[in-house]
Each structure stands twice: as C-alpha cells, then as structure tokens.
Image (tube, rainbow, N blue to C red):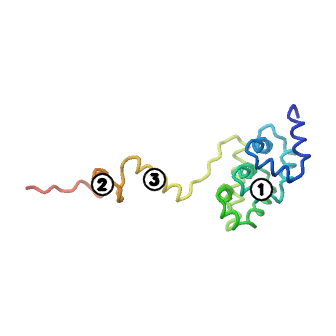
Amino acid sequence: MGAASPLIESIFTQPQDTLVALCKHSQASHVVQKLLNSPTATVPNRRRLLNALKGRFVELSLDTVASHIVDACWGSPMNYRQSIAEELLRAEPQMRESYSGRAVWRNWNMDKYKTRKQQWFQLAKEEATATLEGKPVERKKTAIQMAMERHAAQKKSGFTTGANATNESKRHATAALDMKSGGEKKRRVE
C-alpha cells in the first residue's frame, strides 16, 4: 500500500458524519476524491469508501465542494453506480433546486436514467470500456449545446442579426443569406 496507507486507514476509521464533513471541506475533499479515481487506488479501498458514503450521496450532491466527489463516483463499478443513481433519483426535486445538484444530475445523465434506463446502462458500459482501454471518453453533445456553440461561432465572426447588431454585421448577414439563396441581388441600374 505504501506511504499513504496510514492516511487511508485513518479516513476509513472515521464515523460517516466525519467522512461527509471531509468530503465537504475544500482541501480534504481532494484526498477523498483521489481515493476514488487515482490509478493507484485499489478496488477494495474504493468500495470501502462508496459503502461508507452510502445513503449520503444526495447530501454530497447538494454541496458545491462535495458534488465533485459524487461526479468522481461515476467511474465506480456498475452496481455501485446504479445504487447511487437510485439514491439521486429519489431526491429529484432537491437535486433540481440546487445549482450543484443540477450539475450532478446532468453529469450522471439522470434524465436518461429516469426515462430510458437501457440507454443509460449502455452509455455507462461504453464509457467504462473506453476507460479500461485507455481511450478518451467523449460524451455526445445535446442539441442545446450544439446550438449554443453555433451561436457563439456566429457571434464571434460578427454574424448577428438581432437588435444589438451593427449595420455592418446586418449587411454581412444579408450578404451571406443572399449567397446561400443563389447569388447576389441584382443591382438596380440608374
């Protein structure tokens, strides 16, 4: 186990309330997070930590610091992942009212878990397989994320047509639309 063994054992001997307080502490939470997602962390230690936090994942999700630990639990074995997802689902109203709760809800794809569990399990399985193979995990973007990116790109290039657009950007927008519709407008000869 190495030099970190006394620290790990010290964390596991703490009562659940103390462990939750460590998860909510801005510096100590990094140690707990490393126990979950460090390449050198052992599977038995991860399981011990997940078992010690069982029943408190909603509370951790609602805390701005501890919510990162819940996100780190996504890489857990499927039976733990499903148990955490069920715990989060039972507290959906609380999760949706909190900023950090909404972030955890989104990162855990809880809407998909709630309505299309088979797709949620498939997504989790694909990500676990990619992680084991050392491939980077890429999540598919939602329609709103793609629309926001398109809008940002258009805004960056000066292609705006709204009320705050300058006359020059409106001319660029009109010219772009004209080109898209089949060519330039015919100029009137005077």
| Depth order, front residue of 86/3 | 3
Q: Amino acid at mark 2?
A: Lys
Pick whichever of labels 1 and 2 is earlier in the sequence: 1
Identify the residue shown where x is 31% and y is 56%: 177
Disc 1/disc 2 C-alpha distance (Å): 50 Å
Q: Earlier in the sequence, mark 1 or mark 3?
A: 1
For the point 89% across and 47% down, the residue is: 14
The reply to whether dot 1 and dot 3 touch (C-beta < 8 Å) is no
The residue lying toward the viewer, choosing from 172 and 7, is: 7
Rendered residue at 31%/51% (across/down): 169
Q: Position of residue 55 (x, y in %)?
A: 83, 60
Q: Which mark is residue 133?
A: none
Q: Is residue 50 left or right of residue 98?
A: right
**Numbered tag placed on residue 170 in the rendering:** 2
What is the CA distance from the residue labelled 1 to the residue labelled 3? 34 Å
Amino acid beneath label 3: Arg
Label 3 SS = helix
Q: Which amino acid type is shown beneath numbered disc 1? A: Arg
Q: Judging from the image, what secondary structure is the residue with disc 1 in?
A: helix
Q: Quadrant of residue 112 in the image? A: bottom right
Which residue has dot 1 on it?
81
Q: Please indicate whether residue 108 sits to the left or right of residue 32 in the image.
A: left
Label 3 Cα neighbours within 10 Å, binned few <14 / some 14-19 / many ≥20: few
Of the numbered discs 2 and 3, the one sitting upstream in the chain is 3
In this rendering, the label closer to the viewer, 1 or 2 = 2
Quickly name the residue at label 3: 150
Q: Secondary structure at mark 2?
A: helix
Graded by Cα atoms within 10 Å as few (under 14), some (14 to 19) or many (20 or more), the crowding at tag 2 reads some
Residue 168, percent from left and from top: 28, 50
Q: Distance between the Cα atoms at labels 2 and 3?
A: 17 Å
